[in-house]
Amino acid sequence: MEVTGTGEKTALAGIMRLVSQAQSSRSRAQALADRAAFYLTLVAIGAGALTLVAWLLLRAEPAYAIERVVTVLVIACPHALGLAVPLVVAISTTLGARSGLLVRDRRGLEEARNLNAVVFDKTGTLTLGEHRVVETTAAEGLAAEEALRLAAAVERDSEHPVARAIVKSAEERGVHVPAAREFQAIPGHGVTAVVEGRTLQVGGPNLLAKLGIQAAPALEAAAERAAARGQGVVYLVEQGRTLAAFAVADAVRPESAEAVRRLHAQGIEVVMLTGDARAVAEAVAKELGIDTIFSQVLPEQKAERIQALQRQGKRVAMVGDGVNDAPALLTADVGVAIGAGTDVAVEAGDVVLVRSDPRDVPRIVALSKATYRKMVQNLWWAAGYNIVAIPLAAGVLQPWGLVLNPAIGAVLMSLSTIIVAINAQLLRREQGRLTAG
């Protein structure tokens, strides 16, 4: 054994450094609100000073001039501006959490509204990360469900991953699996057992070669289709006759197709990133309607592929679940980690999908757009009402008998804060849309 790196020199330590850098980020909308509040404070002080000088030049009573200054300062107090963004962010993160979206970095949620490309890692994200029977072809006179029932009975006592896939597929489809007797593993070829008095065998092409038999034409055609998709094939055999062929592959999540459809409806390109062979990637992409495929990508190349998309002017989100996905999650404009994934991937994500449901990705985009709309509305109101309120407080309409005293100014200032708070609360109407997708 050769140790190539320890401590801070390991790949994992490097990934965690990237995570630490990402966590130090800050929301641009909050920074904008802080700057606006700062400038509004300067405007208020400047307007107050100008008001004082103007009324003294107009030979007003000093007490009256001071009253105008106090009204200006009270009415221009940037309380509403200070609440405009934080209140919306607090509500949006709460809504997200209730809908299974854990927001770790506010900038990620903020950027999601600008996305025009979403990159999905295949294994464990679009797929279950576990093998299943994805196609069953039975010989004439035998139902596909019956073939799966018999094969699962033979494989029940096997520990082979393919055997587990067959048994699990039968269980998930509600197929009753009978007990088997005289189970025997045939190393490198398959297994044999007696089920309901029938001696059955299950195995791959090596089993057929060992037995010196050939699959029926329909089963052979099914095997060729599976091979073209990069999927494995096992056969159910009885007394030298092939009864069925099972294509076994990493099963696609039931929710993945709906997630892709919703992203397309939002005008977002869907990209799949995988280390699998091109044939396997194309089969999954065709099933889900994915636009672009990056296949046979090495772990260290994932971040490079994200950067390549960004150089094309695209705003990219990366959705992944593994340790190897962490650099790509950090490189993307928005990193989305699958909640059932590794701790490193979760730490690298801006948003974590608690339910590991890919349909939550378009929900992130919808929440981001709704959050941004409320932020803009609040900022415009909190800063914009001062355009009218400050001149009124300064007394520009005094010749026409309209003068605001400090008490009225305090009421208007409080009213602007209440309006901002109510408008932010209206974001809760998005809860139903997020839940429904």
Image (cartoon, grey):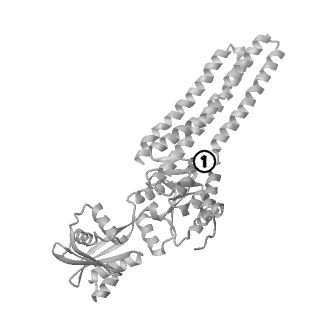
Q: What element carries label 1?
A: helix
In the rendered image, the vertical position of residue 152 relative to residue 266, given as above or below: below
The residue shown at (51%, 45%) is: 367
What is the quadrant of residue 251 in the picture?
Answer: bottom left
Classify mark 1: residues with Cα within 10 Å, few (<14), some (14-19) or many (20+): many
Q: Which residue does the image show at 62% across and 30% down from the upper left? A: 80
Give the image location of residue 324, x and y in percent.
55, 64
The answer to whether residue 398 is left or right of residue 354 is right
Amino acid carrying label 1: it is Arg
* Residue 99 shown left or right of residue 145 in the figure: right
**Residue 170, image quadrant:** bottom left
Task: Give percent across and percent down for residue 149.
Answer: 23, 68
Q: Is residue 125 left or right of residue 11?
A: left
Q: Is residue 124 left or right of residue 369?
A: left
Front residue (pair 183, 113): 183
Q: Residue at x 42, y 75 (%)?
A: 230
Q: Does residue 25 lie above or below 253 as drawn?
A: above
| Residue closest to the eye, 128 or 369 | 128
Image spot of residue 262 (x, y percent): 45, 54
